[in-house]
Image (tube, rainbow, N blue to C red):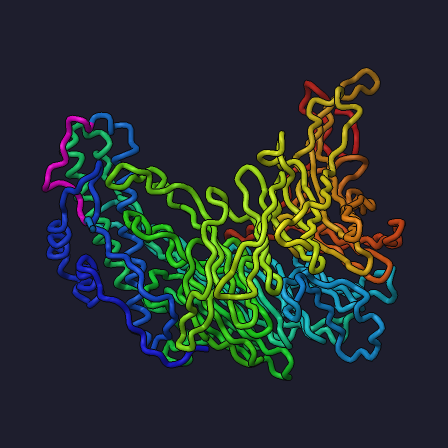
Amino acid sequence: MFGGFGMEKGKLTPIILIFLVLNSGCLGALEEVSEAIEDTIDVLEGDYPQLELPERTRSSPVLQSYDACESLLADLKKAVYDEMVVNLDQQSYWHWISDPWMFMMDDFALAEDTAVALDSGDTGAAQENPSPSGSTDSSREGQFSGTNNQESGVDEADFLKTDGYHIYMLNGQLLLIMGVPEFGNLTLESNLTIEGNPTQMMIDGDRLVIASSIQYWSLPVDSDLRSLMSEEVTVSYENSAAEDYSYTYTRVQNLVKYTVVDISDRTSPVVEKELYIEGDYHTARLVDGTVRSVTHLWTYFDGIRNWVDLPDGYWSEDDMNKRMDIWNESINQTMILNEQLISNLTLEDFVPHIYEASDDGIYTHPLTYEKCTEFSASSDSAGRGFTTIMTLQMLSDEISLEVDHITSSWAHVYSSKDTLVLAEPANDWWWFWRNSDWEDATNIHSFDISDANHTTYTASGRVEGTVNDQFSISEHAGAIRVASTLDNWGMWWRNSETDDNGEQVWNGPTNQVTILIDDGEGLLAQAGFIGGIAEGETIWSARFVGDRGYLVTFMNIDPLWVLDLSDPYEPVILGELHVPGVSTYIHPVDDDNLLTIGIAGGEGGLGLDWSTTQVSLFDVSNTSSPKLADTIPLTPAYTDENCMDIITCGWSWSYSEATYEHKAFTFWAPESMLAVPLSTHRYVYDQIEVDGRVYSYSGYQYVSMLKMIGVDTENGTLSTHGEVEHSGFYNEEGFSSWWSGSTSIRRSVFMGDYVYAFSSGGATVHRTDDLQLMVELELPGNGPQVYNYREGVEVDATSEGGEIEEDGSEGDSTNSNSQSEG
């Protein structure tokens, strides 16, 4: 929630005056506009005709709320216009620099009147264990693991949740509720179909909030939402015999749906509320009964061209001067067309629409309830996408809703119990095109979430470089710590730039940690800074724990850095350790030990062996001299004794979701046991002879397992405890057809003396000490999603299976788990 600040934006550059003339309604004066564009044509130093780009500079990252919708719309239009001009200029670059006729340009001088345009100058991971509402039995408290959360007291959304008595899982389009009558048991209690593609959920007492992604083409053809998201556009040709044609224009193709489910009766869950917002789902956090969910919307505008529409005769023109004239005229016409379209855009074209389902149909919420005061942007924002924070209060009888929209790029999200932080790129890639005096930077926006009913903006700051993920951000004792990498993300053209002395401008990435503190006037001011960390490398993982910080950087070998952050004004590096491979996730076990998972080192300890996942244990008790206590390589593949008889017998590289998703990493401290998923697959083709006839035999084989690793911090060792197998859910008689969904074990939960494993095909319960199988349960819900591309036609995502057929014939193919003569 933002206060009533007035939005003050910088002065517009002269080139935008043309756009403003159009935007003010003077659309009839196209000749004058064309002449104005041609007047800006100039030849610049360089090898291609350049457009005069709008001025792009930085002032303040502080968010200011709008006090008028007209100001918001004007800023959004300007952002679209600026990006469009840069895109066209880059099109000109690619056209004239990279096309094959450029070798002809040696004797062709760009005449001064022919160039187009426009030049410018607590200790670590916390696991939440909510108890079911109404339960008086607290005997299970602390006896089961929950979601692997970054911060204690802040539950992160995931597709699998537990309250110790039930396990809730999103599988395909189903919400599955499984009962745990006693540890070591598992029963399927109920399932509920959820619209769209449910991805994550939060649980509080007897309510679930489920976030689903809904793609326009998956909606039924008679859906009210489908008609709200699209319109039919008819194209007519003047002075032409060509027939008119129509097409469906969808400004936004994705919706995020929030389904609130009453689970007071676990055997019969009931949908309580359904909300939709345009855009893409990002993440959600639950603190003290309040869900804060973050989505992002980037809108497509029909007809705006980021390319130059050239006439047919252009490609057959050999005269380069005439070719240039045609190019100039074409780009002029493209810009005029774009300016007309941009000037006609309305607020409805930009901002995310919110819909709500009711018994009477779909209700469309107003775009704004407060004259756009719920919208905000940095003073120097050049973005036109929206990050939306939706605040849902779940504890009250009536679910309350609050929405805040920030003009921004896609943001990383961090949350402590009292502070929500968004880290968004200060500028998108296009902003840096021919604007290389600026380095990459990230805006840091903080929000006070201590009030369960409101999300209140507090302050913003800016740090160098880009942020890797949520673990690169932390709030502690009022200070926000940010680890970032200064690199040329998406700015390939900077790699070859030189200064006036011919020296390379870009010398490779570098890393830094910045500590920000609110100055009380809305600015997160830099209090402390450590720069120049691991020059030439990039941050692969980070973790802040109390007064310490840990970084893993990588280029050819993996240094682990230990930081002292106890004095926010004087942070220092305490120690570093170089080890082979790289860690992609850091998990604090206690004050003196870290567990990490990542990719093993390559040959000679340099580079990476992507076929092998690696778990490592670090001793950081001596912060100035951290040690690698132990490491264990993991691979699910095995040597096939019959490999010589199989044409293709190689396993794909192994992979573990835990290397990029911390919620798949489950460390259970009471048992000192780590569980991580590991998977691979291969395609098998062989020939077999039956009764003198030769048959081809083909299909997929899957390995889906959960690796159990014992962690002994006292002796500094890791040991293989065993494996939980789910391969049988996906391989029938040895191999299978292509599985349309994931075959990996994706989550695990420790309950008492047992470990529960979940994949899309099934769930298992094993006794932890000897991995004796106790329960094996096949799960529904892993069917393909249906897409409605046109009326009466449904298409699903199933694939062809493996097959056996007689060589030399066109015999009928069958599923790979059966054999028959062709």
Q: Residue at x 27, y 64 (%)?
A: 344
Asked whether 725 falls inside the magenta stretch, the response is no
Location of residue 309 with respect to 394 vertically, above or below: above
Nearer the observer, 708 or 726: 708
Q: Which residues are magenta?
A: 105-118
Q: Is residue 331 left or right of residue 227?
A: left
Residue 604: quadrant of the picture: top right
Q: Position of residue 23 (x, y in %)?
A: 22, 65
The x, y position of residue 652, in whole percent, is 66, 34
Q: Residue furthest bottom?
A: 397
Residue nearer the viewer, 534 or 428 = 534
Is 115 colored magenta in this rendering?
yes
Residue 222 visible in rendering? no
x 44%, y 67%: residue = 352
Report the predominant secondary structure element of the magenta stretch.
Answer: loop
Seen in the picture, residue 417 relative to 80 is either above or below; the reply is below
Image check: 534 left or right of 373? Answer: right
Residue 624 spot, x, y in % from top left? 61, 52
Q: Determine the residue positioned at 78% across, 51% down.
A: 711
- Looking at the image, residue 778 sits to the left or right of residue 438; the answer is right
Which of the image's four quarters has the C terminus? top right
Residue 102 appears anywhere in the view: yes
Picture coordinates of residue 293, whole percent (x, y): 55, 68
The residue lying toward the viewer, choosing from 104 and 534, is 534
Quarter of the figure with residue 172: bottom right
Q: Quadrant of residue 59 in the image?
A: bottom left
Q: For this view, does 131 lie left or right of residue 509?
A: right
